[in-house]
Amino acid sequence: MDISSAPTDDEVRSFVTRSWGPAAGESVAPLGAGEWSRAYSFTDDSPADATGQRWPPEMVIRFGRHRTDFVKDRVMGGCPTVPVPRVREIGPTPWGFFVTSERAAGTYLDTLGGDEMSSVLPALLRTLDAVAELTPPGPGYGMWDEHGAAPFESWRDALLEVAHEHPRVAGWKELLARRPGPAAVFERGIAALDEQLGRLQRRADSAGPRRIVHSDLLNRNVLVNATSGVVTAVLDWGNALYGDPVYDLAWLLFWWPWYPAWSGVDVRTAIEEHLAAAGRGSTDLAERLLAYQCHIGLDGLTYNAFTRRWDTLDRVADQLDALLR
């Protein structure tokens, strides 16, 4: 979400008060903001919604420009095998759209220390197994829309789309060109990704299953109970794709070094051993992980150019450069 167009805290309290009453408005508390949405908690003691369904009093309301993100949360909400909060309502606001959902308990995965991560990692990998078993609700590959359809005929085409602009991050090419070093890494990365995906595509056993991919882990989108080692919620499915679920494992690998507290946790070995034990190991696993990490690095360059986070852009470029070498 463009934070300049987001509601202020007072505007959120007024909105909640008008919608659910003074007590709900007084209970509003900020939970945090990302690039695409801003989240608040509130308490609604109403006995039931307009349909007669009862909801827990502890709720979350998020505001964002993109209704599709919230619809995808509703599609995933209440999944019997993956802990995703149920969505109660989606509607328009002066700033775009809002969504209300159950508030899940837990600690953000990103805030864990090393010992806590060691305890939680097996549960996280099992949760990703459950996501990998979900059947996409619509056709195609790549980012799916609110109707459940994704635009590409192949996983390779969906990944190579990273070379092109789209409305949500419009203007990144011009901004990236201002940084010659990262721009050069980007061009090398696109060529390498094309080659890697072509090599995988030529192998019949390397296409990977077509499943739902979250594709935005480790951005305060996973809640856990660090004491019991349980994943309590997987949040924010706005960036979800249809493609190879190994992509989510590559996401962990690429961003793991950004969390110094986890440096003593060998996530790659944990992934390999987990997949082997689950019967999901494959001879091309290393190639797929490398290709998807390359894509994640490229996507990180486009995003950080768009947001003008130059220090982060340079660090992503250095990491991608190391992968390419």
Image (cartoon, rainbow, N blue to C red):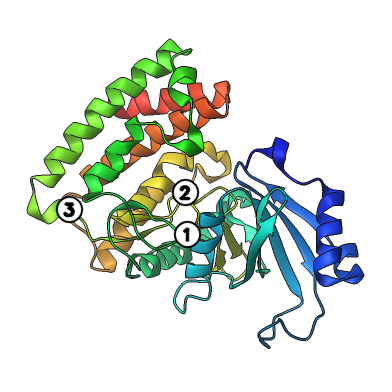
Kind of residue at badge 3? Ala
User: Which residue is pictured at 56% across the width and 47% down the height?
Assistant: 219
Q: State if disc 1 and disc 2 touch (CB < 8 Å).
A: yes
Counting from the top left corner in percent of width and height, residue 107 is at: 65, 60
Which callout, 3 or 2, points to the residue nearer the camera? 3
Counting from the top left corner in percent of width and height, residue 250 is at: 36, 47
Picture quadrant of residue 86: bottom right
Q: Is residue 57 left or right of residue 307?
A: right
Look at the numbered disc 3 and give the secondary structure of its residue.
loop
Residue at which label 3 appears: 207
Kind of residue at badge 1? Leu
User: Which residue is pictured at 47% across the width and 26% down the height?
Assistant: 172
For the question of whether residue 236 can be seen, the reply is: no
Look at the numbered disc 1 and give the secondary structure of its residue.
helix
- Give above or below for 324 relative to 34: above
Real-space CA distance between mark 2 and mark 1, rounded to the nearest whole angstrom: 9 Å
Sequence order check, earlier mark of 3 and 1: 1
User: Which residue is pictured at 55% across the width and 41% down the height?
Assistant: 259
Mark number displayed over residue 121: 1
Counting from the top left corner in percent of width and height, residue 12 is at: 81, 54
